[in-house]
Image: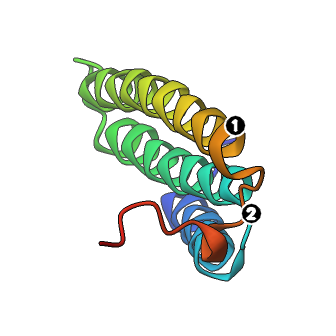
Amino acid sequence: MIVPVSHVAALSAGLFALGLFGALARRNGIGILISIELMLNAANLNFVAFSRAQGDGSGMGQAAALFVIGVAAAGAAVGLALMLAIYRHRRTIAADEIDLLKG
């Protein structure tokens, strides 16, 4: 059974909107990072779906998705390391209580 691209694009838009809402509404730093990962995965879903819909045999959509996954993994590692360092210094990871860069 072939799923139409419009259905996949609608699912991807919903996932992206859910991630955007989570990134803007959450106060927890870890929750914000998870929401950003959800937004990146929605973009990956679009890359793969549109590459498949075009019938492109080169796999450029899959390659782009793998690149984004790699960059997201590196970003998550750096983000979690920053959250750990902030927690050790401030004893909180609440985004509205972190003001380390204020002068």
60 or 27: nearer the viewer: 27
Side of 76 relative to 90 (left or right)? left
Seen in the picture, residue 54 relative to 71 is either above or below; the reply is below
Sequence-wise, which precedes: disc 1 or disc 2?
A: 2
**Three-letter amino acid code at disc 1?**
Arg
Residue 63: quadrant of the picture: top left
77 or 53: nearer the viewer: 77
**Label 2: how many Cα within 10 Å (few below 14, some 14–19, many 20+):** some
Quarter of the C terminus within the rendering: bottom left
Identity of the residue drawn at 69% across and 37% down: 88
Seen in the picture, residue 47 relative to 62 is either above or below; the reply is below
What is the total number of numbered labels drawn onto the structure image?
Answer: 2
Viewer-nearest of discs 1 and 2? 1
Q: Report how far apart the C-alphas of labels 1 and 2 lie in the structure.
A: 15 Å
Side of 25 relative to 103 (left or right)? right
Seen in the picture, residue 80 relative to 103 is either above or below; the reply is above
Quarter of the N terminus within the rendering: top right
**Three-letter amino acid code at disc 2?**
Asn
Identity of the residue drawn at 27% across and 20% down: 57
Identity of the residue drawn at 77% across and 50% down: 91
The numbered disc on residue 88 is 1
The kind of secondary structure element at disc 2 is loop
The kind of secondary structure element at disc 1 is helix
Q: Where residue 76 appears, x then y in whole percent?
A: 53, 33
Residue 12: quadrant of the picture: bottom right
State yes or no: discs 1 and 2 in contact (Cβ < 8 Å).
no
Q: Where residue 87 appears, x then y in whole percent?
A: 70, 43
Residue carrying label 2: 28
